[in-house]
């Protein structure tokens, strides 16, 4: 059987080879009718593009890299889901690469990654999205990149984030509206910009409602379940014990819930517990966790889509958007008794 080529598709569809290429790469400047006709021919002829030839012809690898350093497996899964959706829609492949945030070691790691994989661009998730040395390195190498969940919004990069501070404000205000005035807070990893943003939201809610900030009610976590256990132990040992705990993510909140239950405290009757992120664990444990739903998949999908758009046709004005975080109330919070 004769191999189907891009020339075959162009001839069968009655369009130019360039038009077929534009459809294949999901480029602009193709009418909807023409795009549909070419896609129909792809299907009719069972055309499968050769990725190697495609990459050589356009001096691209058609691979986007995504680097991460996050103890939450569900967060990385959601990042990957969003990134894959964007890549599949744009005929790109995705490479997921774990890294550690350690200065020169990180830069060397990324340099080796770029040399071995010849990536067209990189998606930077927290904490890398706010690491200046890495951004400077990528700029020096002219590597396109996009930030996900970054606190930096005033530079010339593609950035898609959610309003973590406002989300933390709303969940703290929710607890205050239930009558809680002694609300403990567990911070996240110090290298993540979300940590400071969520802490700011917590403090702003206290100030707004005339509640004095108490340093004794704040514990340092790092977004992991185990750090939540250590923080919960310190919080639950306080006398008087706070009536509510707001943890910076759901895994730490789940740890608080477990330790409280082990101490025969009833949740939410004796103590209310809230988290952040709306990770699967928030829905699967009992009582279900009140939390903030952060649109991680959508943030990543938009960031990757805009990055690919920029690679195909560089944009003068960088794409920046802040997506809404949403309060979800469940059984783990209730009015003070």
Image (cartoon, grey):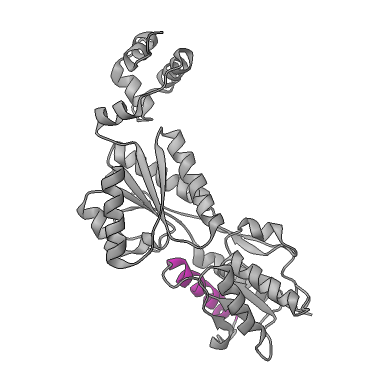
- Please identify the quadrant where the C terminus is shown: bottom right
- Occupied quadrant, residue 306: top left
Q: What residue lies at 21% left-to-right and 51% top-to-bottom? A: 141
Outermost residue to the left = 140
Q: Residue 128 vs residue 288: left or right?
A: left
- Occupied quadrant, residue 180: bottom right
Foreground residue, 298 or 117? 117
Q: What residue lies at 70% left-to-right and 71% top-to-bottom? A: 258
Outermost residue to the bottom = 239
Q: Residue 334 vs residue 210: left or right?
A: right
Whether residue 119 is visible to the viewer of this picture, yes or no, is: no
Disc tally is: 0
Q: Position of residue 137 (x, y in %)?
A: 24, 57
- The image shows residue 66, relative to residue 215, as above or below, that is above
Whether residue 50 is visible to the viewer of this picture, yes or no, is: yes
Q: Which residues are magenta?
A: 193-209
- Please identify the quadrant where the N terminus is shown: top left
Q: Position of residue 225 (x, y in %)?
A: 59, 68
Q: What residue lies at 20% left-to-right and 54% top-to-bottom? A: 140
Indicate yes or no whether the magenta region holds residue 194: yes
């Amino acid at each position: 059987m004769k191999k189907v080529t891009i020339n075959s598709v162009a001839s069968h569809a009655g369009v130019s080879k360039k038009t077929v290429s534009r459809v294949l790469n999901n480029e602009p400047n193709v009418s909807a009718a023409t795009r549909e006709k070419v896609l129909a021919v792809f299907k009719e002829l069972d055309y499968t593009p050769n990725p190697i030839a495609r990459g050589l012809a356009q001096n691209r690898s058609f691979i986007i890299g995504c680097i991460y350093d996050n103890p939450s497996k569900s967060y990385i899964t959601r990042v990957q889901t969003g990134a894959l959706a964007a890549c599949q829609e744009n005929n790109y492949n995705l490479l997921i690469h774990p890294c550690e945030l350690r200065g020169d070691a990180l830069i060397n790691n990324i340099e080796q990654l770029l040399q071995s994989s010849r990536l067209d661009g990189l998606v930077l998730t927290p904490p890398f999205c706010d690491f200046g040395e890495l951004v400077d390195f990528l700029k020096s190498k002219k590597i396109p990149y996009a930030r996900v969940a970054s606190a930096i919004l005033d530079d010339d990069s593609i950035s898609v984030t959610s309003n973590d501070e406002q989300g933390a404000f709303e969940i703290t205000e929710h607890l205050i509206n239930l009558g809680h005035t002694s609300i403990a807070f567990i911070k996240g990893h110090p290298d993540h910009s979300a940590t400071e943003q969520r802490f700011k939201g917590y403090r702003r809610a206290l100030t707004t409602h005339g509640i004095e900030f108490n340093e004794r009610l704040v514990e340092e976590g790092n977004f992991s379940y185990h750090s939540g256990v250590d923080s919960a132990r310190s919080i639950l040992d306080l006398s008087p014990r706070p009536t509510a705990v707001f943890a910076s993510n759901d895994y730490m909140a789940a740890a608080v819930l477990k330790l409280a239950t082990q101490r025969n405290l009833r949740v939410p009757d004796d103590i209310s517990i809230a988290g952040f992120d709306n990770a699967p664990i928030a829905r699967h444990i009992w009582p279900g966790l009140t939390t903030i739903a952060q649109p991680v998949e959508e943030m990543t999908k938009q960031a990757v889509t805009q990055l690919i758009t920029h690679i195909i046709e560089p944009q003068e004005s960088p794409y920046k958007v802040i997506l809404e975080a949403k309060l979800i109330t469940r059984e783990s919070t209730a009015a003070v008794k």
